[in-house]
Structures are given as C-alpha cells and as structure tokens.
Image: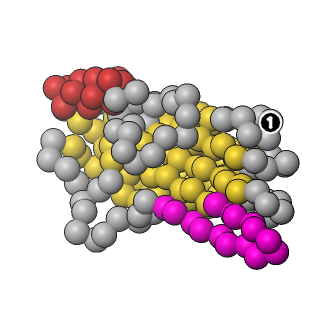
Amino acid sequence: MPKGLKETSSIIMIGATAQESAPGAFTSARVDLQLNPLDNEVFVVYAIDLDGKTPELIPGTRTETKLSVSTTARTSVGSIANSNVLAQLQTVVQENGGGAVLNAKHAGETPPAMLEYIGIIATNDFFVNVQGVNNVGFMSGNVRLYGVRARADSSIYAALVQSELLSA
C-alpha cells in the first residue's frame, strides 16, 4: 500500500464494457466507483485485464480495435504515453492477397510483480474507451480492474485529485 493511504477493503474486481455508438466512432463508457469523497476515499489499482473484440477481416484492408482505461474523460482512446491512461490494447488485422496477419499490441495488462500498484483513482469514476478503424460492425471491449479502496489524509487526497484532474 502506498505511504499515506490506509486500505479499507480487500481486493475488489470491477468489470466494465464499452461499445462503439457507431462503427468507427470513438466511444467512452463512464464507470462509477462509488467512492466517498467526504472520507477521502481512493481506489488503488493493482492490475487491469483488457479484452477487445477482434477486428473484422476485410480483403485488402487494415482493420483495428483500440481499447483503453483512463482515470479521466478523453476525446480519443489514447495510449500509455498519456498520463491519464492506465492501460491500453490495440488489435490490428491486415489482409493482403489472401493472407491475413493479426497483431495484438498491449501495454502490460498486469505489471511486473515488483510494482506495488499501477495507479490510484482519486475521483469517483474511470473510463473505458473504444474505437474501431475500418470495421463494418461495432467494436467493443471489456475490462477488469483489480484493486482496493483506501483512505488518504486530506493533503494527500487533495494532491491526488488535483493531479488526476490536471492529467486530462
């Protein structure tokens, strides 16, 4: 547990889904953690699993499914290069002349065991972001967060909330 935080629950698993509102349209689903800001409650994320729908196989076309989990609302799926993105997955299908290749690029769904945690969500929600590229149908993705609820002292809580909101 990070210094300055007191664990108030055992491990919690939270599952969520996002589906495009239209093929190729960036879509974000807000997931409420039901944290209590009056008690300076935060969610410490230990691991994230991502499961994106496989892009369609379309002759002569590169198709993609992009999926991410972010601590604040986004206007694109983003990548782990963005400070508010905790995890991302990109799956690409490329068909050319009768042969197809599937590539899945993900940024360490579960981090190495030497990391104490992978993120802290200080606001009341997180976001599941999805977007397909060149698919005919709707793309979607599922995520599962593993973590614990914790209580922070007021100065640490204020710093965590401000840092999270400024990372947007």
| Label 1 sits on residue | 22
**Can you give x and y, in whole percent of width and height, for residue 92 in the image?**
64, 60
> What kind of residue is marked 1?
Ala
The dominant secondary structure in magenta is strand
Q: Is residue 100 left or right of residue 159?
A: right
- Residue 95 inside the magenta-drawn segment: yes
Quarter of the rendering containing residue 56: bottom right
> Is residue 82 something that shows in the picture?
yes
- Residue 162 inside the magenta-drawn segment: no
Front residue (pair 33, 56)? 56
Q: Which residues are magenta?
A: 92-106
**Can you give x and y, in whole percent of width and height, for residue 156 in the image?**
19, 31
Which residue lies at the image location 36% right of the left edge and 45% below the top edge?
81
Q: Is residue 160 left or right of residue 28?
A: left
Residue that lies at the very extreme toward the front in this rendered image: 97
**Dividing the image into 4 quarters, which one contains the C terminus?**
top left
**Dividing the image into 4 quarters, which one contains the N terminus?**
bottom left
Front residue (pair 72, 145)? 72
Residue that lies at the very extreme toward the bottom in this rendered image: 99
